[in-house]
Amino acid sequence: MGAAKKIEIPVSITVRDLAKLLGATSIQVIKILMMNGVMANINQTIDFDTAAIVASEIGFEAIPEKLEEEEIEKDNGEVPLWRQIIDKEDPRSLTSRPPVVTILGHVDHGKTSLLDAIRNTNVTAGEAGGITQHIGAYQVEHKGKTITFLDTPGHAAFSAMRARGAQGADIVILVVAANDGVMPQTKEAIAHAKAARVPIVVAMNKIDRSDANPDLVKKQLSDHGLIPDEWEGDTMVVPVSAKQRQGIEDLMEAVLLTADSMKIEANPKGRVFGTVIEAKVDRSKGVLATLLVQNGTLEMGNVVLAGNAHGKIRAMFDYKGKKIHKAGPSTPVQIMGLTEVPSAGDIFQICASEKEARTIVETRKAEAAANKTKDKFTLEDLFKRAQEGEVKELCLVLKTDVTGSIEPIEGELQTLNKEGEIKVKILHSEAGAISENDVMLAAASRGIVIGFNVQPDPVAKKKAEDEGVSIRCYNIIYRLKEDIEKALKGMLEPEYQEISTGKAEVRAMFKISKLGVIAGSRVLEGEIRKGSRVKVLRNGEEIHKSEISSLRREKDDVKEVKTGLECGIAVKGFESFEVGDILETFTVERFGS
Ligand code: GDP
């Protein structure tokens, strides 16, 4: 396998933009995300690591896009951007900060319950009733040390959690239900944490259940590279019951031990930046954004810039809803004052003035607009990408009469993609007649062109013939789907093409008793062979099709007659020749995909 092509991907990107960047359809991206346990819609923002998984499925190697031209150098593809920023700080100015922890795991294994249990078990002294408001993150104290948790509401938003976790988490708590063991999303979580180079502490939850089987779970974890410390490995596996609030202290202990073995540092006086955890609009307060400060100290009155959102901080609250004026590294804060709602996962920074923030936003918007037109559809690019991939797919170019038909057809076709089988890959889809470009695109990737309620224009038709590209037109979606399905299974009737091998013109007719009417002809092109298939053309129209039953030169039977020579031709089942008829011999060849 050749090295995957590198592609720059921003720290966060919408599904739609990622699809464009990768030359894929949004449906494809959504499908890949789904296969990886991430439910996302087309407008949803996903983080770099998630995008990287998608990119690799499509055959690219993702590298993080540089953040700000002059401020941050190109990413080396291994160290997350935020760590690189901290690495730029003077080492002497770095001080330790609370570890930021996120909880991952399979659906129903108890992520939410565990977050609740931790929140309620470890509330700071004197705080009755626990924390009632949720801002997407909270902090707990354990033995005088603070831990920041990225709090995810419910398991459905696995992608959102990834968006958060990957940007800011130092440690992942992997929840595995002791009665259920390692499940698909557990494996995904392990892969994500490993990709982000974030250490894992396992919370073996539901230990209270009678069907809990801790040894089996440990064995499964070992099989996935997480060898429990009691088995001489380096993964801490802590039995807990979120429901009965058992083992929570031990889990906190394990997190702090893990943190101790890492360098979890930042410069509280350094450049201020961090990640947007979540944001929403409140009717009376305006935009409320939860930010995780990762370096520097965020202060009241600072001008914050996150994505295209910016504004002066008018009020700042901690996770308990208490007004604060300053927030140092690893502190989650909720701020008021942004002009619009930033996306979860956006990196924020501070600007010297609102004017500067506006200028940067304008530049970003202009760049985004420029990229849009650039990405739109360069044939060469698509050619290259298609060619570089291995042929594990049936490549299609889809043309439809109206834009509205594209998504349903793509959706139907995606349902055909099964694990381990040849997959449908839609190279390009667009409304409009089938053009020469479509044919060329299909040709380059040995694909076919599908028309839905559209036909090829004459130039495209000619090109398809020249390039051996198959064009198939449909007006019923299920027929289209059925055909593709057959093609995937290799059952589709191949399409055949007649290749002309010779042409002769009828000059005179003779009747020969044994043979019937013979066409005295002159060979104009190629050669005429006995036994060849032949068409009789009159004024360009085919009037008969069969084969050459007799071929003579003078009185001798011959096998072939070349251009420029005269001969007598008998055509099986046809005698009513006319002077000027063209006898065209041909072979039949399979073409297309
Ligand atoms: P999530 O999907 O990972 O967020 O899982 P939830 O926290 O929603 O929990 C899923 C189900 O498991 C709920 O019905 C919980 O009550 C139950 N559950 C969670 N933790 C425990 C536990 O420690 N013991 C038992 N017996 N049930 C638990």
Image: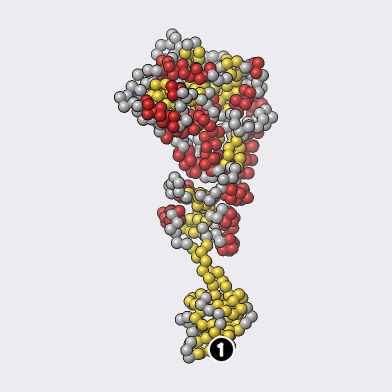
> From what the image shows, is residue 396 above or below residue 303?
below
> From what the image shows, is residue 325 above or below residue 389?
above
- Read off the residue under disc 1: 555
Q: Residue at x 42, y 15 (%)?
A: 249
Residue 15: x, y in percent? Answer: 52, 38
Identify the image quadrant of the N terminus: top right
User: Viewed as shown, does residue 69 lie left or right of 26?
Assistant: right
- Which residue ends up furthest to the front in the rendered image? 232
- Residue type, mark 1 in image: Lys
Residue 437: x, y in percent? Answer: 59, 55
Q: Residue at x 39, y 18 (%)?
A: 247
Residue in front for this viewpoint, 289 or 567: 567
Q: Residue at x 53, y 89 (%)?
A: 510
Residue 502: x, y in percent? Answer: 58, 75
User: Viewed as shown, does residue 540 lie left or right of 405?
Assistant: right
- Mark yes or no: residue 160 visible: no
- Mark yes or no: residue 358 visible: yes
Mark 1 lies on a secondary structure that is loop
> From what the image shows, is residue 260 above or below residue 42?
above
Residue 455: x, y in percent? Answer: 52, 60
Q: Residue at x 51, y 25 (%)?
A: 199
